[in-house]
Structures are given as structure tokens and as C-alpha cells.
């Protein structure tokens, strides 16, 4: 490998490349578009496109694609080559500004939630110059937004960009009151990505993993994660080789891959980059998932990004570390001077209020059939959205809410708002791993997103909700006569009214469920419970007021999410039926026959020979087979009824309430049979084989 600084960003048309390759005037014009969102002239776009094409061709690219993020799935692309015929029968490589700026994929094949009838399939992709173009698989990829011809967003990037602009505008207003004039404020994100790696040969033998991304059958391994030896343990050589290649590929793509380690479950790992502006962090995470999948296959492995590939074993999440910053300072950093502290408290209060008022929207943003296996299912983190602030900051907040004095840990009396707050050390604030939304010194870590999710959703909600609170603060404080005193009052009032969202205890406990209910916090256990909250008047107003999503766009997203839920469950149910009928029942019958024959042969030899072991096993298997057979019939009927429900919400509810319990019964019986059946007879690799790389 060449040196890391040499390869870093080598496949990205980044600022340095632009500066080197574009005429000065063009570079300046493009910079204005990137930094301030000014529109780009087509003549400028033509020069940029040509320079991009030359650069891409020098790196072996032959095609270009508009790379975008439709409402389901992760990313999409349609490749076109640069070739253009010449009169003499040859070709030249060409790429115009028009092709760079706008594309027209056939939008009919992407979900739109009724925003676009199939007959009027036209949609277009529009270049997002704030995210750099890059080369992947000999193709120049241009990050784009995807919209219907009527202008409605059909993707996840568009609302994210709108929310970033909303939070920037409102944060700038608040900062101005502190005498700080900045052109923009950016939300920043660092995404910690969890994943499983298993052997490709074993994967190929599991239809459930291939079709649904998770195991629909399989009894727990004899040894799970209880020894707690895997986390930070020595990385398997094959996994280490894999991680090295992933790092290198990501570095080439300008992604700041930083940390890699094992996770709590066997075969589970994590990769974390250094944080960046939200938009590029989200794009970077989507690319990271793609690279992780692709590189795994080269090493004879499969990277599983599903939230719950293995029942009874820890699932995978994607921690969304979030903050807001000016180009030079992190606004969630307590700072060292009294005014910096006041500023910190104002922004902190805005986040607390935002999370409290929009807990349901945050829950919706992480809702997916895969993530239902984590949230609300006795696993990290719970479905109740609450915030953890740690002891030190917790005491400050208590003091503010109670108008009492605050003593810091060195027992100094602090007159809040005038004196200096202590620096909240990471060690003190990061202990609670059960909280979905934890303050970790100078940022918040939202732990509820699922491992396969597109983080655009959660950050769109976070940015917009915080923008709304900052707007309300600015509205009040802009006319304040005594800014400092009134700002402090506002902080106190806000904290008093919203401190119910703060919980520093054990988020997994029974008591918390009851306490949260008493506090009036939402406990939306499943995707089906959560999704209807998208349509509440309060939530529609938030998104609409800030131009992030129109009511029609929200409704469309609601429908796409419901449809996605039902489709996923339908596929899982069908896959279970197929596996039960074609693989599991025949395996049980084979082994039953073996047992029955053995009993019969033994009996022929002598009635005195004991057959109790075989008889007992045969009885158990027969019972399992009966339960399985009954569950197969029930599942068939329930799936059909759910699928045929004409109301999308009704259909999803039926899948949740009726289909899932039967899937659980079917699985339990099959898993019991697995424990009895001879290994040579069982058609599926076991959990032990997959998780512990046992051949
Ligand atoms: P852990 O949560 O495992 O203790 P770290 O403290 O190293 O891990 O940070 C986790 C992630 O948070 C990293 O991706 C890091 O870059 C990111 N991060 C750090 N500061 C910020 C910030 N101001 N805004 C967003 N993300 C941040
Ligand atoms: Mg973390």
C-alpha cells in the first residue's frame, strides 16, 4: 500500500482536485455554490463537467452515474458511458454541464408513496455540489437529489439538505445575539457502524440470510456473548485482513475511517469514521456500507448489516453522534468563559426541548421492521426516547430547574450563567450505555438508529426540531432588553418544562417503563405503533414550517414506510414457509425415519434391547413436526389475510399482530427440532457454526 496521505481522497473530486484542475474563475464560482448555495451557471457547469470527466478518465473511469438515495433501499445508480460517436466512426469521451447538473432516471421503479402515478413516471436527479463526486467501480458517481417533476422530493437527501439549511439559519440568528456573526452553522455527524461478518460458504446455505438478511430459524449457540471476551478482543486474522482493505478503500474515497474493533457479540464488529458535516457523513456512511459488503466477498466473507441477523444475540445499531458547529467552534462544547457557558446552555436547552417535543418523530425516524427486533425488545436501546446527560451536567440542570445553587465537584459555588461551568469530561458522561440519546461531553450520541438505516432520516428530524426551538428562542431574545438575564431565564424555563425527557438510570429496567409512562413519555414499541405519528398536526407543522417536507411529501413517506413494513414481513413469512416445507420438515422426517427404523431393527433383534432413547427423540420430533405443520397452515392463512387487507395501515397491523406471533411459534418448534435432529440431517448451518467460524 502507498502511504495513507497519498491514497487518501485519490478517488474523490475534492477541493484540492478542483483547485488544481479548474480555471480560477470557475473554481471561485463553484466554491460560492458549495459554500453559500448560490445557483451555478450552465457555462460554469460545462467547464466543471469537462474537468471532472478528464480527471475520471485518467483514473480509468468509462461511465458516470447520478448517485441518489431513494425512499427505500440505500442508494441507486444508473450508469451511462461518456462515449459520443464521431463522424469518422470513432468515439470521443464527453460529459456536458447539463448531464452533470440534471439526470432523468425512470422514476417509475422507485417508491413514491403515490406522489407520482406510474404513467407519469418522470423524475429527475439534481447535482448536490456540497458532496464531492467520486469514482467507484470505473464509474464517476455524482451525488444527487432525486425529485418528481412536480418538485416533490422522492429521496432522503433533499429533506436532509433542507433541514441543514433550517438549523443553520436559526443557529446563526441566536449566535448573532452573542455577538458572533458567521455565514453558516453546520450540523455534524460521526456514525459508528456495527456489523456481523460470517463465512460466505455457510451464508450460501441459508435462504433466510440471502433473502431477508436475517436468520428466521436457528437455536441459540451453546456459547454466546456471556463471557464478554469478544469486545476489544484480538481480531481474527481473516477479519483483520478484511478491515485493512475496507480502511484502504474508504480512505481512497475520502472517508475518514478511524476506529475498528470487535463488538460484544461473537462475529460482530464496528467501524467508526471521524465526524464530518452531516450531508457528507450520511453519504460517507452509505458508501461505507457498500464498500464493507463488496470487500467482504473478496475475503470469502459476508457482511451482514441487518439489525438482528441472529435471535438471542446482540443486534447491530448505528450510533449517530451529532453536534452543531460554526467553522471554528462546536456549539455543544461548554467552553471556558462565562458567555461561552451561557451560549452552551442556550443550545443545550434547545436540544432538550427539541428531543422532548419531537420524541415521537425521532422514534419514527428509526422505525423499521429490522430495528423492531432491537427497540422495545429488551435490547439496547429501549423504544422510549429519553436523554442522558451524566451526573455533572445533570446537577447543573437540576440547579437551573430548581433555582438552587450549584456546587461543582471541587465544591466551588457557581453562580450559573456568570461563572464558568466545569468541562464535562467524556469519562463522566459516557457511562450510560442504555440511554438512546446520551450527552458525551461535547456532542449527543443517538443510539437508536438501526445498522442498515440511512441516517438522513434521523438527522433531518434532529436538525429541524432544533431549528424550531432556536427560532422560538431567537424570536424572544431578539427583543430582549437585558440579553444575558433573559437568556438565562429562558434556559431555566425551558429546562423546567422539559426535564421529564432526562433520565440517567437504567433504560432497560421495568421501573423505567412505568416511570416513563408516569412522565407521559411515548413508548412506541413497534414500527406500526410509531409510523402514524408522522401524520400528527404538530409534526406536519414542524416539517412544513421549515420547508423540509410538505404535507403531501410526509404522507407519501408514511405510505412508503408502511408498504416497506408489510412487504418485508410478507417476504419473511414466505421465506419461512418455503424453508419449513422444503428443508425443515423433510429433514425431521428423514431423522424420524432413521429413529423409527433403528427402533424396529432393534426390536427385531431382541425385545429386551432398550429403545427408550430413540423413542424419546422420535416422540419429541413428532411433536415438533405437528406444531410446525399446524403453524405452517396458520401462517399461510394469516399472511394471505394481512397481504389482502386493502388498508395499508390495517395490512401492516395484521402483519404485526397476527403474522409475527405465528412466525414465532413456527420458529420455536423448528429450533427445538434442530436441537434433537442429528447434525448430518439438519439442512442449515447452525448458529455455533456461523458465529464461531466452526467448519
Ligand atoms: P465512543 O462513542 O465509542 O466512545 P468516540 O468518542 O471516539 O467513540 O466518538 C464516536 C464518534 O463521535 C466518532 O465518529 C467521532 O468522530 C464522533 N464525534 C466526535 N465529535 C463530534 C462532533 N462534534 N460532532 C459529531 N460527531 C462527533
Ligand atoms: Mg459510541
Image (cartoon, grey):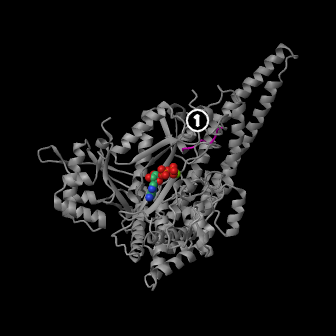
Question: Would you call the spot at circle 1 few (<14 residues within 10 Å), some (14-19), or many (20 or more)?
Answer: many
Which quadrant would residue 605 be assigned to in this image?
top right
| Residue ID for mark 1 | 691
Q: Is residue 386 visible?
A: yes
* Residue at the outermost top position: 605
Tell me if 677 is positioned left or right of 564 in this view.
right
Q: Is residue 388 visible?
A: no
Q: Residue at x 34, y 61 (%)?
A: 124
Q: Nearer the viewer, residue 489 or 640?
A: 489
Disc 1 on helix, strand or loop? Answer: helix
Tell me if 305 is positioned left or right of 166 in this view.
right
Where residue 686 appears, as percent x and y from the top left, is: 62, 33
- Give the magenta-colored segment's residue range: 213-218
Image quadrant occupied by the C terminus: top right
Is residue 121 shown above or below 634?
Answer: below
Where residue 504 appears, as percent x and y from the top left, is: 63, 60
Q: Residue at x 83, y 15 (%)?
A: 604
Which quadrant would residue 233 be assigned to in this image?
top right
Where residue 82 appears, as percent x and y from the top left, is: 23, 48
Image quadrant occupied by the N terminus: top left
Tell me if 295 is positioned left or right of 412 in this view.
left
| Main SS of residues in magenta | loop
Where residue 214 appears, as percent x and y from the top left, is: 57, 43
Q: Nearer the viewer, residue 79 or 675?
A: 675
Is residue 178 shown above or below 252?
Answer: below
Residue 455 is one of the magenta-drawn residues: no
Amino acid at each position: 500500500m502507498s502511504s495513507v496521505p497519498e491514497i487518501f481522497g485519490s478517488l474523490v473530486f475534492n477541493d484540492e482536485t478542483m483547485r488544481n484542475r479548474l480555471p480560477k474563475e470557475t473554481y471561485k464560482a463553484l466554491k460560492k455554490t458549495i459554500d453559500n448555495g448560490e445557483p451555478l451557471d450552465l457555462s460554469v457547469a460545462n467547464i466543471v463537467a469537462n474537468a471532472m470527466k478528464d480527471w475520471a478518465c485518467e483514473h480509468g473511469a468509462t461511465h458516470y452515474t447520478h448517485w441518489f438515495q431513494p425512499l427505500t433501499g440505500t442508494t441507486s445508480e444508473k450508469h451511462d458511458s461518456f462515449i459520443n460517436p464521431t463522424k469518422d466512426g470513432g468515439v470521443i469521451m464527453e460529459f456536458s454541464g447539463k448531464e452533470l447538473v440534471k439526470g432523468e432516471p425512470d422514476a417509475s421503479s422507485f417508491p413514491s408513496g403515490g406522489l407520482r402515478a406510474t404513467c407519469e413516471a418522470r423524475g429527475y436527479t439534481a447535482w448536490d455540489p456540497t458532496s464531492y463526486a467520486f469514482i467507484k467501480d470505473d464509474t464517476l458517481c455524482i451525488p444527487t437529489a432525486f425529485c418528481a417533476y412536480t418538485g416533490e422530493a422522492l429521496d432522503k437527501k433533499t429533506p436532509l439538505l433542507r433541514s441543514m439549511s433550517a438549523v443553520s439559519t436559526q443557529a446563526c440568528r441566536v449566535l448573532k445575539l452573542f455577538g458572533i456573526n458567521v455565514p453558516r452553522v453546520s450540523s455534524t455527524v460521526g456514525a459508528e457502524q456495527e456489523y456481523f461478518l460470517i463465512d460466505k460458504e455457510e451464508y450460501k446455505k441459508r435462504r433466510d440470510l440471502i433473502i431477508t438478511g436475517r436468520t428466521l430459524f436457528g437455536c441459540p449457540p451453546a456459547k454466546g456473548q456471556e463471557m464478554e471476551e469478544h469486545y476489544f478482543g484480538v481480531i481474527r486474522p481473516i477479519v483483520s485482513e478484511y478491515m485493512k482493505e475496507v480502511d484502504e478503500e474508504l480512505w481512497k474515497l475520502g472517508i475518514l475511517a478511524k476506529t475498528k474493533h470487535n463488538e460484544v457479540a461473537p462475529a460482530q464488529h464496528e467501524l467508526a469514521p471521524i465526524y464530518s458535516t452531516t450531508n457528507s457523513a450520511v453519504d460517507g456512511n452509505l458508501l461505507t456500507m457498500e464498500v464493507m459488503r463488496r470487500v467482504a466477498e473478496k475475503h470469502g466473507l459476508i457482511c451482514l448489516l441487518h439489525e438482528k441477523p441472529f435471535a438471542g444475540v446482540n443486534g447491530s445499531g448505528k450510533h449517530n453522534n451529532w453536534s452543531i458547529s460554526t467553522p471554528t467552534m462546536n456549539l455543544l462544547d461548554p467552553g471556558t468563559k462565562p458567555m461561552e457557558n451561557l451560549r452552551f446552555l442556550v443550545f443545550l436547552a434547545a436540544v432538550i426541548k427539541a428531543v422532548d417535543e419531537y420524541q415521537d418523530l425521532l422514534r419514527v425516524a428509526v422505525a423499521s421492521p429490522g430495528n423492531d427486533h432491537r427497540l422495545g425488545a429488551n435490547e439496547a436501546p429501549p423504544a422510549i426516547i429519553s436523554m442522558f446527560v451524566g451526573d455533572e451536567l445533570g446537577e447543573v440542570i437540576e440547579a437551573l430547574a430548581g433555582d438552587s445553587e450549584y456546587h461543582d465537584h471541587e465544591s466551588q459555588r457557581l453562580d450559573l450563567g456568570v461563572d464558568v461551568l466545569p468541562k464535562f469530561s467524556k469519562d463522566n458522561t459516557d457511562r450510560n450505555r442504555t440511554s438512546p440519546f446520551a450527552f458525551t461531553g461535547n456532542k449527543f450520541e443517538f443510539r437508536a438508529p438501526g445498522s442498515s438505516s440511512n441516517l438522513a432520516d434521523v438527522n433531518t428530524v434532529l436538525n429541524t426540531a432544533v431549528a424550531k426551538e432556536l427560532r422560538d428562542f431567537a424570536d424572544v431574545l431578539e427583543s430582549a432588553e437585558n440579553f444575558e438575564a433573559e437568556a438565562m431565564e429562558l434556559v431555566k424555563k425551558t429546562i423546567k418544562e422539559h426535564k421529564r425527557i432526562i433520565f440517567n438510570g437504567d433504560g432497560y429496567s421495568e421501573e423505567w417503563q412505568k416511570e416513563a409512562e408516569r412522565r407521559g413519555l411515548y413508548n412506541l414499541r413497534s414500527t406500526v405503533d410509531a409510523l402514524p405519528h408522522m401524520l400528527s398536526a404538530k409534526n406536519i407543522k414542524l416539517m412544513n414550517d421549515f420547508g423540509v417536507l410538505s404535507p403531501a411529501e410526509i404522507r407519501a413517506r408514511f405510505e412508503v414506510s408502511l408498504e416497506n413494513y408489510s412487504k418485508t414481513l410478507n417476504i419473511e413469512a414466505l421465506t419461512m414457509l418455503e424453508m419449513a416445507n422444503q428443508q425443515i420438515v423433510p429433514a425431521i422426517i428423514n431423522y424420524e425415519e432413521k429413529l423409527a427404523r433403528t427402533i424396529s431393527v432393534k426390536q427385531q433383534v431382541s425385545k429386551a434391547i432398550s429403545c427408550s432413547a430413540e423413542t424419546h427423540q422420535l416422540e419429541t420430533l413428532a411433536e415438533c413436526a405437528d406444531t410446525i405443520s399446524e403453524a405452517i397452515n396458520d401462517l399461510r392463512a394469516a399472511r394471505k389475510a394481512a397481504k389482502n387487507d386493502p388498508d395499508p395501515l390495517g395490512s401492516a397491523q395484521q402483519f404485526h399482530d397476527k403474522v409475527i406471533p405465528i412466525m414465532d411459534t413456527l420458529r420455536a418448534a423448528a429450533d427445538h427440532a434442530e436441537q434433537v435432529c442429528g447434525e448430518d440431517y439438519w439442512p442449515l448451518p447452525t448458529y455455533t457454526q456461523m458465529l464461531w467460524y466452526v467448519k
